[in-house]
Image (spheres, grey):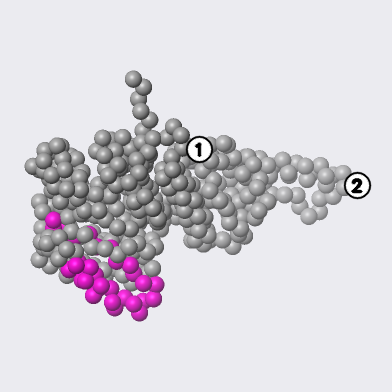
Amino acid sequence: MITYDEVDKLRSIRAPEDSVLSLYVQVPLDPAGLRELRARAGELVRAAAAENGARLGTGDEQAARDAIAAHARDWLDHTLAVFVCGDLGLLEVVSLPGALAERAVLGVRPHVRPLLVTLQRHPDHRIVIIDRDHVWLLAVSGERIHAIAMPSAPSGPSADVGGWHGLKSHATSRRVAGLVRHHYRDAAAILARTRQDAGAQPIVVGGHAESIKHLLRVLPHEVREDYVGSFAADPHVLTAARARDLAAPVIEHCNEQREQQLVQRVSAPEFGIRAAVGLHACLAAVNAEEQDLLVIPDAGMVPGYVCERCEMITLTCDGCCDWGAASRPDPDLLEEMALRTLYGGGDVISVRELPCGVAARLRQARAA
């Protein structure tokens, strides 16, 4: 799994010409399909080279195909991203969860837009597993799971606790109930502290319905806002890997809902919300650094130009104020727009379907 720092590191790589190969290939779940991967990778690479007439380094196609063959069996049902440039000594292989669109791109830099999609769809998150007596907190980052120690509630009364007409039993039960409530409050406090340390992350809670309800009731407001859903499970037989698998559909559903809401907001903005809808309007907004949210589609690429003098991104080679004097071709303006938005402190959301092509929410106009 990739991180934003690693994306930045890849993006900092630059060749003097379009000789950096970025290859994304889906690895099938069935190992029997692995034999076709090398051939499919070769077809993607040759098609990309023929499309823009780029120079493919000697041995780069072979290096990419060999890398896929070497790593595919370890990452069934994943997408492999391979970045190759023999001139720069670059050979990087990254495994990405799930299926991404297959593509090969040749450019002066690695093509990283699918990596940004992966980071959006598989964010770092926390899983809380809770019952009356125990709480486990798991920090999930990609394929990695880190267990964080959590408090346990004091044990309940022994089986021989009783009393005349149940008086002693009632008093003991009241004491234990108080300890159990304290147990949930302790768990909530630790979640609040981890939020301060690691920042806001989605939280998924697993366990029995009653325990989940008790925990949610005592969560601080800011932590409650991070809660995205729950799943039912017996904490005593649940492994960390199984908890991650059960939480994954909850995270996916939350992402899909967020995407749909954002598409509706930027496609039909409410009164008082400034927005740009369509490619040309969004290009103008990005060039003017007006956007604070950019919504782009998963599929497709938009070729264009980037001026290395005035830094404008345009659809034609002479579309900048320098009349293209220093323009260079760019294989995907959507990626360039996304990265400029992120580097400017804005947010980027990639969606599965976007009728308007591209949309952006603009920063509020400053008062005169």
Q: Picture coordinates of residue 197 (x, y %)?
A: 44, 38
Region rendered in magenta: 18-47
Q: Looking at the figure, which quarter contains the C terminus? A: top left
Q: Which residue is mark 2?
A: 164
As helix, strand or loop, the secondary structure at mark 2 comes to helix
In this view of the protein, which residue sits in the foreground, 353 or 202?
353
Q: Residue at x 30, y 64 (%)?
A: 102
Mark 2 and mark 1 residues within 8 Å of each other at the beta carbon: no
Q: Please state if 320 lies on the left or on the right of 173 as rendered.
A: left
45 versus 265 height, above or below: below
Which quadrant of the figure contains the N terminus? Answer: bottom left
Depth order, front residue of 306/185: 306
State the image coordinates of residue 315 (x, y, percent, origin top left): 20, 48
Q: Measuring 50% from the left and 58% from the top, which residue is drawn there?
A: 249
Q: In the figure, is residue 351 to the left or right of 282?
A: right
Q: Residues within 10 Å of mark 1 (few under 14, many from 20)?
A: few
Which sits in the foreground, 329 or 131?
Answer: 329
Q: Which residue is mark 1?
A: 193
Q: Is residue 334 left or right of residue 275?
A: left
- Name which residue type carries label 1: Arg
Q: Residue at x 17, y 68 (%)?
A: 46
